[in-house]
Amino acid sequence: MKKEDKARIIEMIGTTLGEYACVYLVQTAGLDAEKTSALRRECFKGDVKMLCVKNTLLKKAFEASETDYSELYDLLHGETTLLLSNTGNAPAKLVKAFRKKDDTLPMLKGAYVEETVYVGEESLETLANIKSKNELIADVVALLQSPAKNVISALQSGANTIHGVLETLSNR
C-alpha cells in the first residue's frame, strides 16, 4: 500500500473517531462470514458503526487525534474491530446479546467511554450497565418531578376527604 493511501486511511479513521464519543476495541477473529455479517446487521440496527482496521493505522489515527487514547495502545495486537457509538452502553449491550448465540466471540479488548478507559473482557458487564446521558437526564427529571407529584396527590386526596366530610355533615 502506498504512503498516500495509508495517509488517506489514517485521516478517514481519525475523522470517524471524531464523530463518536465511545470507542470499543473487540476481537472478532474467530467469526466466520455468516456470523460477521450478522454482527454487522446488529450493529446497523443498534446505531453502532463497525470498522475492521489494521492496528498500525489505528494507532497512528489515535496518535493524531486530540483525544488521549494512549491507554489503548497495548491492546492493538491481533485482529481489531472498532465498534463506535455515541451511546456509551450500546456496543456493550450489542456484544452481550450477540454472545448469547456464540459464547466466545466477539471478545472485548477495551473501550474508551466518556473519557474513561476500560480494559479487558471483565469490563463488559460494567460497560453494559452504564447509563447513557439521556437515561441519566430522564432519571434526574423523574427525581425532580417526584416531590411535586407527591404534593399534588396529597392536596387532591385531602380535598376529597374534606369534601366527603362536609357532604356527610350536610346530609345529617
Image (spheres, rainbow, N blue to C red):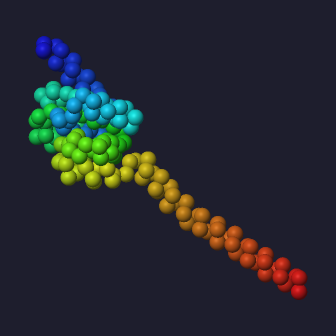
Q: Residue at x 46, y 56 (%)?
A: 139
Between 91 and 104, the residue placed more toward the observer is 104
Please identify the quarter of the rendering in which residue 39 is found.
top left
Which residue appears farthest toward the bottom when viewing the image? 172
Q: Is residue 49 above or below residue 97?
A: above
Between 78 and 151, the residue placed more toward the observer is 78
Q: Is residue 167 visible?
A: yes
Q: Is residue 164 above or below residue 31?
A: below
| Left or right placement of residue 113 versus residue 110 in this view | right
Q: Is residue 20 visible?
A: no
Q: Where residue 11 sits: x, y (%)?
A: 23, 22
Q: Where residue 102 sits: x, y (%)?
A: 25, 43
Q: Where residue 65 sits: x, y (%)?
A: 22, 31
- Count of numbered circles in the view: 0
| Left or right placement of residue 79 versus residue 133 in this view | left
Which residue appears farthest toward the right when viewing the image? 171
Q: Residue at x 49, y 61 (%)?
A: 143
Quadrant housing the N terminus: top left
Q: Where residue 137 sits: x, y (%)?
A: 45, 51
Please identify the quarter of the rendering in which residue 55 is found.
top left
Between 62 and 66, the residue placed more toward the observer is 62
Quadrant housing the C terminus: bottom right
Between 83 and 69, the residue placed more toward the observer is 83
Q: Residue at x 28, y 26 (%)?
A: 15
Q: Is residue 41 above or below residue 141?
A: above
Q: Residue at x 19, y 48 (%)?
A: 121
